[in-house]
Image (cartoon, grey):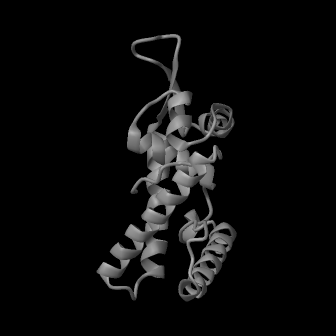
């Protein structure tokens, strides 16, 4: 079923083009922030640390489910974070056999450093925007990401993480 009309096909062409340009630029710059912290943490690490910070300690399966990726991907992505001391593995308090991942104090500090740098970048990029424009952009981008995530999940595509506010 084609949901477009001739009237909005031009606008939708512009939208898909701008999303493609955004994706390319975001990947090129990794929207990593400013200063020495710029590009210092890859996207997978940032998303994993951010999720652990927002939701607290959890097992690999729970982390994978909350991010919409498979457990083997989480295991592979979290290994260097454990090796560098950003994430620590501990025993589950109720089931000592189960492993729980949690942000270490070093991970918390590093995450805040990266967030601060990225926050500064967003401030610079939107410095001439009114506060209500920033709010509208955040709201619409969240809505867009949620719709995209839902579509990916419905199609069984890995990576259908539900967006969360930072």
Q: For the N terminus, give its image quadrant.
A: bottom right
Residue 66: horizontal and vertical position, in percent?
A: 49, 39
The residue lying furthest to the left in this view is: 132
Q: Which of the two residues, 114 or 5, is positioned nearer the viewer here? A: 5
Q: Which of the two residues, 10 or 99, is positioned nearer the viewer here? A: 10
Q: How many marks?
A: 0
Q: Kindly identify the residue that appears in the image at 40 percent across and 12 percent down.
A: 94
Q: Kindly identify the residue that appears in the image at 69 percent across and 36 percent down.
A: 76
Q: Kindly identify the residue that appears in the image at 60 percent across and 51 percent down.
A: 152
Q: Kindly identify the residue that appears in the image at 38 percent across and 85 percent down.
A: 129
The answer to which image quadrant residue 2 occupies is: bottom right
Residue 68: horizontal and vertical position, in percent?
A: 56, 42
Q: Which of the two residues, 25 or 45, is positioned nearer the viewer here? A: 25
Above or below residue 138? Residue 49 is: above
Q: For the C terminus, give its image quadrant.
A: bottom left
Residue 119: horizontal and vertical position, in percent?
A: 43, 67
Residue 86: horizontal and vertical position, in percent?
A: 54, 40
The answer to which image quadrant residue 25 occupies is: bottom right
User: Would residue 19 appear left or right of 56 to someone viewing this image?
Assistant: right
User: Would residue 92 appear left or right of 60 to someone viewing this image?
Assistant: left
């Amino acid at each position: 079923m084609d949901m477009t009309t001739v009237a909005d096909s031009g606008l939708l062409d512009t939208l898909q083009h701008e999303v493609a340009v955004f994706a390319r630029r975001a990947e090129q710059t990794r929207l990593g922030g400013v200063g020495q912290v710029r590009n210092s943490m890859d996207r997978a690490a940032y998303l994993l640390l951010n999720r652990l910070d927002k939701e607290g300690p959890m097992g690999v399966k729970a982390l994978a489910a909350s991010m919409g990726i498979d457990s083997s991907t989480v295991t592979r992505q979290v290994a260097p974070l454990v090796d560098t001391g950003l994430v620590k593995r501990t025993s589950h308090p109720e089931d000592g056999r189960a492993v729980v991942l949690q942000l270490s104090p070093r991970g918390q500090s590093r995450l805040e450093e990266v967030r601060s740098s990225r926050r500064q970048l967003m401030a610079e990029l939107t410095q001439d925007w009114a506060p209500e424009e920033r709010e509208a952009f955040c709201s619409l981008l969240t809505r867009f990401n949620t719709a995209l995530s839902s579509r990916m999940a419905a199609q069984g595509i890995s990576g259908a993480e539900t967006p969360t506010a930072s």
